[in-house]
Image: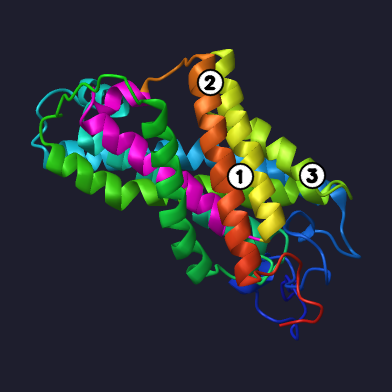
Amino acid sequence: MSARPDRPADAPALGPGQFLARLTEPPAGVPFTQVLRGPSFVPVRSWFGLALALFAYALVVPLVAQLLQGLFWLLDGRPSSFAEWAMRAGRYELVQGMVSGHLALACLIPIAIVMVRGWHGRPVPYASSVQPGLRWRYLLLCLPLAALVLNAVMWGARIGQQTHLSVTAGWQWWMLAILLCSPLQAAGEEYFFRGYLMQAFGSLSSNRWVGVVASALLFALFHGVQNVWLFADRFAFGLLAGALVLLTGGLEASIAAHVANNVFAFSYAVFGGGVAATRALQSIGPAQLVQDLVGFSLVALVTWWLGRRLQVATLTPSRSI
């Protein structure tokens, strides 16, 4: 007796594409936070998507960091036990640790893209903006503006204060690592928090601001132990960055603000106390919060103004692209 076939003879062979959600365009004329909604939208898909994305974060980021630390430990000639070396690296006492941590967070970019395309079935460019796609000209123009504003506010607040210079050993390697890896780390966090999480939370409500607030709250909570002022600082940054994404239709301005903030924060740390101290920061005072709020708000205003001048798209196209 012949064996019963597992599938009809005329059934197509399964390919990788059949495990992805069916590719569909988002509704026309909707903001970034509503890209995942549509006529066939089912809320449970976004709830499961959020759970999957957070699980991927918890699994992939530490795993990649550990793998990279192991590789660097071997290349460093195994100077001590791996556990001891990895502990120092994780505290950013070693430049290899910062590189490992930042490249691990850069993995949030493919995670966000996989969720948007594979789980929700939206074309990959909609993970970046409603245009769709990453608007490179806008991003590259926002970067110097964000850097100029943040530095002007910081140095303005330090008028009359004494500056202490303490150069970290091997500062050249630290600066190279910061310039190459910190932008990837910042972009990874923006694609994950202001990108996928904001879209997923936003899809659960017709109010376009729900995704902004929810993603900002998670962004602040994911930074670990912190006092109330530092939590407020990070929550405020998340709110302003999310508002920028919503009002400009994409991630470019928020990426620029995040990159400028992190690159200069780590760079100044190399010449003023060490990157490990910045990494271990768990508290700030109200004065620092006010300074950061002024800086973040001014960056948001000037990059939003630039977006208006460039007439960047803020809603999805009225027809399929």
* The label number, if any, that marks residue 209 in the structure image: 3
Q: Which residues are magenta?
A: 250-279
Q: Quadrant of the N terminus?
A: bottom right
Q: Amino acid at mark 2?
A: Leu
Residue at the spot 74% in from the left edge and 84% down from the top edge: 9
Helix, strand or loop at mark 2: helix
Pointer 2: what residue?
A: 230
Q: What secondary structure predominates along the stretch shown in magenta? A: helix
User: How has the structure been colored for display?
Assistant: rainbow
Question: CA gap, disc 3 to disc 1?
Answer: 12 Å
Q: Are marks 2 and 3 in contact (CB under 8 Å)?
A: no
Residue 17 picture quarter: bottom right
Helix, strand or loop at mark 3: loop
Could you tell me if residue 191 is visible in this image?
no
Could you tell me if residue 210 is visible in this image?
yes
* The label number, if any, that marks residue 241 in the structure image: 1
Question: Is 164 on the left-hand or right-hand side of 155?
Answer: left
Residue 28 picture quarter: bottom right
* The label number, if any, that marks residue 130 in the structure image: none
Q: Amino acid at mark 3?
A: Trp
Nearer-N-terminus badge (3/1): 3
Question: CA gap, disc 2 to disc 3?
Answer: 23 Å
